[in-house]
Amino acid sequence: MSIRESKMMQTARLLKLWNIYRLLRRVYVPVARNGLVLEIGSGGNPYPRANVLLDDSIESYDRWERIVMDRPIVFAEAERMPFRDKVFDFVIASYVLEHTDKPEEFLDELQRVGRAGYIETPNAFSEKIAPYSMHTLELNVDEDDKIIIRKKAAPHPDLELTTQRKKAVGDSRTWMRFIRKHYYLFTMRYYWKESIFYEILNPDYEFDWNPVSLREKFGSESLQGSRMRRLFLSMVRLLLRPRCDIDWLSLLKCIECQSTNLRYKGSDQKTGLQCVDCGRVYPIVKGCPVMFLKQHKPRFGEEVNEDV
């Protein structure tokens, strides 16, 4: 079962008012006022309605802006989220799915922790004509409302097509203006409820190339965005952000043994979380739980001490 766009979004799409459509889709979250909403990979511009955020790095390597931490946030992998089953009424994954090399694990986790949600990515056409070297997937939605996924065989699958696009359109700023004007042509949008229907065309393909992050490609300073844009977005988030007190112990589980029996380590609730069953300790950094598998090396600007 899928969720339809709002009537205002349908009207904007019909009239080809893509800038208005882009704004509307960021505020359209079809849940009750007290519904709990998770956003995965929120980076520097989280959806205003999201109550809880999840990201894999405090540095926000693959986003244009610095990461925003203005509400409860957990640092973990989207493919192994430390949340209990079906604790969220709605899960947003906007421009995140195309970064994973394990799309089946990513999508299965969305369905496990949420009852419904929204996925948005560049579509396969966009990825062919203007590929990003940090993207691993090409995605579309077919006529049966199923996500079709192809793992990219190279960072730039069709160099000739990319070269022709650069000659025809010009520099990256001109291209970005063109995409914003014709937003609907270059994106894959998918509302879902209860289940996500998808097919991976080359499931056995093993990636033999490494995605390049925005930070590695452009450096940290170029990722900050304009000061006016950051100020505007922060004001929008402040006006629209829902008020919600989060009880971490009621939402989280241990990703090592899957136990929901967690407790705070220390009386101040700021040191860490500990699994009562297996003893695993998860540090809390800047007020945020850090919950990766032990072999995973999170990308943090500071050392994460797991022996808290």
Image: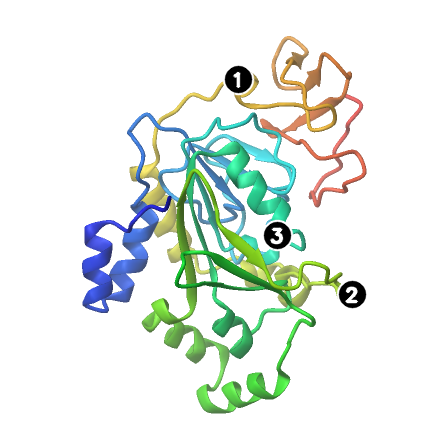
Residue at x 64% of width, y 76% of height: 156
Which is closer to the viewer, label 1 or label 2? 2
Whichever of labels 3 and 2 marks the residue nearer the N terminus, that label is 3
Residue 158 position, x and y percent, is 62, 82
Residue 199 position, x and y percent, is 56, 57
Residue 108 position, x and y percent, is 58, 42
Q: Which element is circle 3 on?
A: helix
Q: Residue furthest top?
A: 267
Q: Amino acid at mark 2?
A: Asp
Q: Quadrant of residue 218?
A: bottom right
Q: Is residue 59 visible?
A: no
Q: Amino acid at mark 1?
A: Ser
Residue at x 79% of width, y 34% of height: 294
**Mark on residue 111?**
none
Q: Is residue 213 above or below residue 265?
A: below
Q: Is residue 204 left or right of residue 230?
A: right
Q: Amino acid at mark 3?
A: Pro
- C-alpha span from label 1 to label 2: 40 Å
Q: Which element is circle 2 on?
A: loop
Q: Which residue is mark 3?
A: 103
**Mark on residue 208?**
2
**Mark on residue 250?**
1
Residue at x 42% of width, y 80% of height: 174
Residue at x 70% of width, y 25% of height: 282
